[in-house]
Amino acid sequence: MTPAASIERATVADRALTEDLGTAPGPQVPEPVVGATDRLRGTIVGAVLTLIAVATRFWDLAHPTDNGTPVFDEKHYVPQGWQVLTGDNFIEDNPAYGLVVHPPVGKWMLALSEWMFGYNPIGWRFVSAVSGVIIVLAVYLTVRRLARSTLIGAIAGVFAICEGVLFVQSRMGMLDIFQILFITLAFAALVSDRDQMRQRMHRVWEEGRIGDSPFGPRFGFRWYRFAAGLMLGLACGTKWSGAYFVVAFTLLSLGCDVATRKAYHVQRPWMGVLRRDLIPSASSLGLMPFLMYLASFAPWFASETAVYRYATGEKIGVDGTWSWLPNAVRSFWYYESGILEFHAGLTNAAGNHHPWESKPWTWPMGLRPMLYAISYGPDQCSGADCIRAQMLIGTPALWWLALPMVGWALWRIASRRDWRYVAVLVAYGAGIVPWFGDIDRQMYFFYATAMAPFLVMGLALVCGDLLRAAPRGAQSERRLLSVLAVSFYIALVIANFVWLWPVLVGAPISSVEWNQQIWLPSWS
């Protein structure tokens, strides 16, 4: 099937894509369109994208290193992962590490990687690379479902492969890529849950049971929402910032439920959500992640030597208002309070400064990337001096269009009630908006990793809108221009990624090439 034919086929679902969140008058209801229908082609495209992601993420994965040791923040997390693997009870318990400031799930992922391949660069990066590949596939499948088009999903997959932040983080033994994996999977599950609830509601509509209750029907057990809660729990068990997505995705899920009940003309949709959906959603997306976070510390409770395991009686007294609580719970509270105090103290006002620090208003366009590793000397450059540098750079062809993407999304929401952009912007905003709450805090561009999957999703949807907006006539000049414009943009993204390749993987380049890679003064 040609790209043009794919566009034609995708337009069948246009009504469902731009359905105005359930406010259409009269007895009309949305078409029960769920995902793209070309399953065989979709499977083949997904397999090809996955193979390309594997080739890029695993190419020369052992570099760069600091003389064979971890680079940048790998120096913190890689030894912790190894200690989890080689110590007792799968938890950090070496006092030399001091206060361990992140939950254990990400360290378990690193420990799994090191268990398979040992304490070496491949060992501490293998599972990160696997996570990066899964993210690419998840982005493709999610946008394919959002756009009801394999073509638009494929565009999103290409963007995810060529996105510099996701690429570099997939090749590092750090925690962020694991958290983004869980967040992306949670988002994919919620999109699937939305579609599944539409299908269930449509069956009720066809059976004539919508009016049985003014609040609408009960949806029943929602496995996709349950899966989203599991993923959010793992995200919080990797880094505390996963809590931002717990709040955002819970609101998103409830908003989709309101829209579904409105779309099928439930008499009291808001009250229906409050009575039918609020408690189950809060349980799956709010309570369960919290319980999973606590469960991730089960090894801590079982350990005799974990950090602050016996703080009660040593760091804090055994008497007082909370003396009725078990000592283990009080010690855990002391430990968690210390983590909060640590993060709260990482402020510029307290004298914490870093040459590669950045603030959240620079993140959408990637104005202040991060240098992860750099070394100088003769190295495969025909005897001349070389530079090996690895930088966390968001591919400019993608990141520099972030604000136009947000503007387009807001216009689509206002003019067409396009739920797809609501979902993407909620997730995108959860990755940046909360950080404005404490501007004095020390921050870095790698915090923006959470924005990257939703940036590429949004841009792919914009490309889909451009393709669909053109008239359907085979000879239409507007149609030809739309296809050419989108094709040119995809080629530009790929070319930009290829250009940045040496500084994304830390390949040896000359000083002249290094200077050519520094596009903005803020990049150096």
Image (cartoon, rainbow, N blue to C red):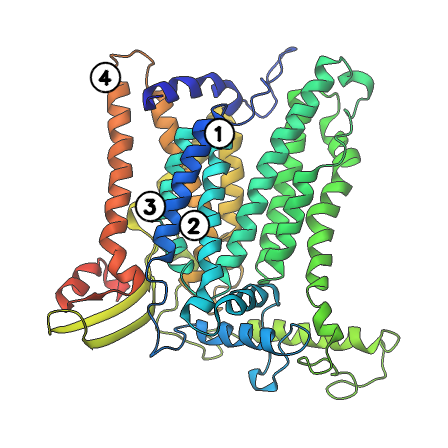
Dot 4 surroundings within 10 Å: few (below 14), some, or many (20 or more)? Answer: few
Q: Which residue is mark 2?
A: 452
Which residue sits at x=71%, y=77%?
334
Residue 345 placement (x, y as % from top left): 55, 75
146 vs 157, left or right, is right
Kindly report the distance in space between the C-alpha atoms of the residues bearing marks 1 and 2.
24 Å
Amino acid on which the number 1 mark rests in the picture: Ala
Label 3–label 2 contact, CB within 8 A: no
Kindly report the distance in space between the C-alpha atoms of the residues bearing marks 1 and 4.
28 Å
Amino acid on which the number 3 mark rests in the picture: Leu
- Which image quarter is the N terminus in? top left
321 vs 394, left or right, is right
Q: Report whether residue 194 is seen.
A: yes
Which residue sits at x=45%, y=39%?
140
Kindly report the distance in space between the C-alpha atoms of the residues bearing marks 1 and 3.
24 Å
Q: Which residue is mark 4?
A: 477
Kindly report the distance in space between the C-alpha atoms of the residues bearing marks 3 and 2.
9 Å
Q: Is residue 490 above or below residue 300?
A: above
Q: Which residue is mark 3?
A: 398
Amino acid on which the number 4 mark rests in the picture: Glu
